Amino acid sequence: MLQKKALVIGAGIAGIATAIRLAVKGYQVNVFEANSYPGGKLSQFSNDGFRFDAGPSLLTMPQYIDELFKLAGKTPADYFNYRQLYVICHYFYEDGKSLKAYANADKFITEAESVTGEPAAGIKKYINNSRRIYNITNHVFLERSLHRLKTYLRWDTLKSIINLPHIDAGRTMHNANADYFNDQHLIQLFDRYATYNGSNPYTAPATLNVIPHLEQHYGAYFPEEGMYSIVTALVKLAKDMGVTFHYNSRVQEVVLDEDKADGVKVNGQLIKADVVVSNMDVWFTYHRLLKDYPHLHPKKILGQERSSSALIFYWGINKQFAQLNLHNIFFSADYKAEFNHIWKQNNIYHDPTVYLNISSKYKPDDAPPGCENWFTMINVPANTGQDWNTLINTARQNILTKLSRLLGEDIAPLISCERILDPRSIESQTSSYQGSLYGTSSNSRFAAFLRHANKSSKIKNLYFCGGSVHPGGGIPLCLLSAKIVSEWVD
């Protein structure tokens, strides 16, 4: 019996994970990647002795990574190691207050009560609500396809459907958080979780208040060799399973034979397969790889609002700051105004919330002695033709002014090297439409449930994985999209 063949378009995290799962199922798998390296948004680079993880900087739910090694009959620790963070994030506010989000729930509650004055019982109630939403939605929304009949023939699915009124979809994240708490610092802290999938807490449904549970209950982690080691470990596993990677190999077309995917065209050559999986942004999959078949495009889905993007400054800093942690947030004084600028005015607020990641805190060789590598990011709108050069220059100065004020030291003279990533370069380097980080936003009540399916309804043998399709963006959800695809493929 001939071995079935599978082609994966794109070596992002979801594409690599899908390749591993299909290889375990006995497929001969080839992965075609346009870049010279694997990882997609999860990449790395070095500059003047500083190493930077260029993309996702937070690792949660590493069990989904371990699962791939176990599925392949391997020992995870032989490929990949990580450690749990004691402090998940250090929050700084304009009024001088700061709050450490400890991994231990009781310690976090004590800290939050001490800093904000919110009663411990109320904070615990909020955490329990986050857990309840997760328990209702997890097995249905995160781990299975919403587009298969068999999903709805399970008892746990029916149980979740019965409990749908309790996922809090009828109000916004911010309204729910404002109902739970009186203190603005804590409201802002929990509103921030909307940015984990590129959305707006003032319009996104309170169902997204499930996200704190994923971080608080399952913990946050740091890979011992940095975030990019997730990529290198999974690529090694894939190769050990017989997967072949083709770099600098941009797929030009998904080739159809009537109503089914017959393979792909690379450098003018047709490469046939039984299964084609696209890890490319679903918008570009249709508009670039299936451009000659507009009647097959899901126009309503492709027209959905895109998620926000990011502006990142990678700075080599000639000093170490003891008050900073691995993950740090410097909040805007007016959060609503900041999101209005992103979502309504399509530009950048003068006082943006700044996320600062410093991997050298846990991996000292990421920076020269006495120095730190600063991954400095703000949320920005997707690229719709703004004057980014002007926006970037202004944002850079505003960020430096803000950090200098809150840290009590002029930061600009400490910068020894710099590289910038903006929505335009995110789009060009990762084929993410408009530079959106998470595909579509979740700014309407059921938008998160209306993402593109992991299998085409019009083209046989064509599947989709990655952050632009179900169940969404971020490393854990991308890994789950690969799992859903593999369970759908015969």
Image (spheres, rainbow, N blue to C red):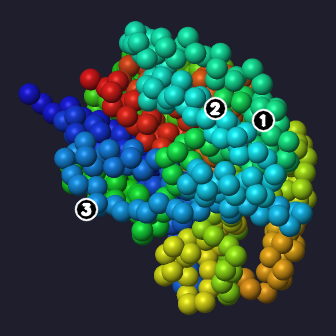
* Helix, strand or loop status at disc 3: helix
Residue 198 in sight here? no
- Of the two numbered discs 3 and 1 on the same chain, state the one appearing first in sequence: 3
Q: Are marks 2 and 3 in contact (CB under 8 Å)?
A: no
Q: Position of residue 357 (x, y in %)?
A: 63, 66
- Of the two numbered discs 2 and 1 on the same chain, state the one appearing first in sequence: 2
Q: Position of residue 299 (x, y in %)?
A: 64, 21
Residue 47 vs 208, above or below: the answer is below
* Helix, strand or loop status at disc 2: helix
Residue at label 3?
A: 78
| Residue occupying the point 89% across, 56% down | 333
Q: Residues within 10 Å of mark 1 (few under 14, many from 20)?
A: some
Q: Amino acid at mark 3?
A: Asp
- Of the two numbered discs 2 and 3 on the same chain, state the one appearing first in sequence: 3
Q: Position of residue 29 (x, y in %)?
A: 27, 42
Residue at label 1?
A: 180
| Residue occupying the point 68% across, 87% down | 319
Q: Residues within 10 Å of mark 2 (few under 14, many from 20)?
A: some
Q: CA distance from mark 3 to mark 1?
A: 44 Å
Residue 58 vs 122, above or below: the answer is below
In this view, the residue in front, 37 or 256, is 37
Q: Position of residue 33 (x, y in %)?
A: 42, 51
| Residue occupying the point 79% across, 87% down | 413
Q: Which quadrant of the rendered structure holds the N terminus?
A: top left
